[in-house]
Amino acid sequence: MYISVRVLAFSAIAISASQAQYVIDGLSFGHNEGSISPNLRGIPNWHIQGEGHTPDLLSDRVILTPPYPGNRRGALWADYPVQYSEWQAQFFFRASGPERGGGNLQIWYTKDGQQGVGLSSLYTATKFDGLALLMDQYGGRGGTIRGFLNDGTVSYKDHHSVDSLSFGQCNYPYRNLGRFSVLTLKQTADYFQVTVDGNPCFRSDKVKLPAGYFFGISAASAETPDSFEVNKFIVSTTNAATREDPNRQPPPQQQQQQQQEQQQPAASSDIPLDLSDTIAASIKSQQDQFADLHNRLQIVNHQVNNIWRELEKLSKRQDERHIELTSRVIPTNDRVDNMARSMDKIERIVLAIQKDVEGKDYKEHLSNLQNAIKDTHISLTEGLPQAMTKIVTGSAPRMGMFLFIAVAVQVMILGGYLLYKKRRNNAPKKYL
């Protein structure tokens, strides 16, 4: 009974380990500590392009279309294809804008990738080969998510009714939520499924997307624009999918990771990841004791190897961070050197002026200046009273003219009075 319980536990652990998801770093961004770009100049293994503007690359997001103005396009395309037939892609996005804003957002999984689709939306794309997942406000429902397939024979740009070609859809009001929505695409051996925020959107067991296709994200805004932002794009696969085809060549980063894993001892799928505590009295035979000890030692060895790999990753990340900081510090050192050279030049000029001042005798010049000021003072003291006397004397009024004017005025008054008396006496008398 004890052995059967342990076998069942090991089997459950092995099944859960085989279903674990492994992130494909070469096709993902934003999953490492929330940083999209290490230098804010580009996303590793992804190509950014725009029409009418350049998409804004921030530390934690990419703004494919700006909030103003409208009629802009932006796109992200992976440089490497997906090399696995079973995968899962998580897309973190947000749309914001005015009340009646418009536009659309697409997730592409196509054969030709950037060369075949580029900045096109679903309605302007030509004969692409693959999947297009469209998010827009079709039907006035506040937001819909629809899936479209093409085998490279139908030109969506010239089709008379593109909306009728969708194979699955669901309603989802994605605009102005104030948070990032999570859209998940999952392809397994049995079905293709789309979920949004953990809720099922649509699923089909008739869709089988082949490996070797490229992921892409494109957005287009209307006259009244919507601003589409991308926060993360995480592509993962299962452990079973990584072992299904040993002849398939993964992207360069995956090849390097696989080479590192090959250099380390391979772990058997029969060895559990952990063992529960057991009572020593329950182990009866020496063989069971040896098996339990052997398994626990191997688990410890695997955990030590995992810790060592994590330390190597951390050391590599620190080295990259150090190189980045060093590259940023070099221009600062140049500026400091320029400032030091400028200060040395100013110091030399000040020393030259000091030597010039100390080497010349300015006593004679000061004595001449003092004598000039003294002469000016004397001339002002001696000449000022005479000048004032001359001015007062020349500007004083004459007494003779004053007396003449006074006598003339009195004579005129007296003459006027006499003339008045004479006319009054000669006037006729009036009697009552």
Image (spheres, rainbow, N blue to C red):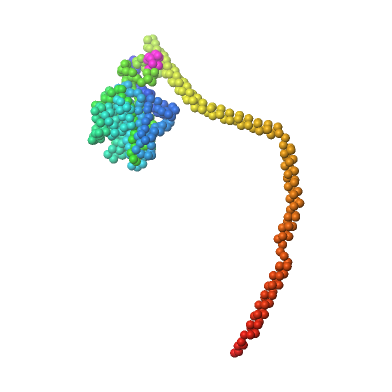
Work out which quarter of the rendered image holds the N terminus and state it. top left
Q: Is residue 260 magenta?
A: yes
Q: Is residue 68 magenta?
A: no
Q: What kind of secondary structure does the magenta stretch mostly adopt?
A: helix
Seen as rendered, the residue at the extreme top is 286
Q: Is 229 rendered above or below residue 415?
A: above
- Residue that appears at 74% across and 49% down: 379
Q: Nearer the viewer, residue 273 or 418?
A: 418
Q: Nearer the viewer, residue 272 or 275?
A: 272
* Image position of 118 (left or right of 362): left
- Residue that appears at 62% across and 85% down: 427
Seen as rendered, the residue at the extreme bottom is 432
Quarter location, residue 7: top left
Work out which quarter of the rendered image holds the C terminus and state it. bottom right
Q: Is 375 rendered above or below residue 408?
A: above
- Residue that appears at 36% across and 21% down: 251
Quarter location, residue 390: bottom right
Decide if residue 301 is in sight here. yes
Q: Nearer the viewer, residue 270 or 294?
A: 270
Q: Nearer the viewer, residue 31 or 98?
A: 98
Residue 188, image x and y in percent? 29, 24
How many discs appear? Answer: 0
- Residue that appears at 28% across and 38% down: 138
Quarter location, residue 418: bottom right
* Image position of 371 (left or right of 29): right
Decide if residue 202 is in sight here. no
Residue 261, image x and y in percent? 39, 16
Q: Which residues are magenta?
A: 258-267
Residue 343, image x and y in percent? 60, 30
* Image position of 372 (left or right of 203): right
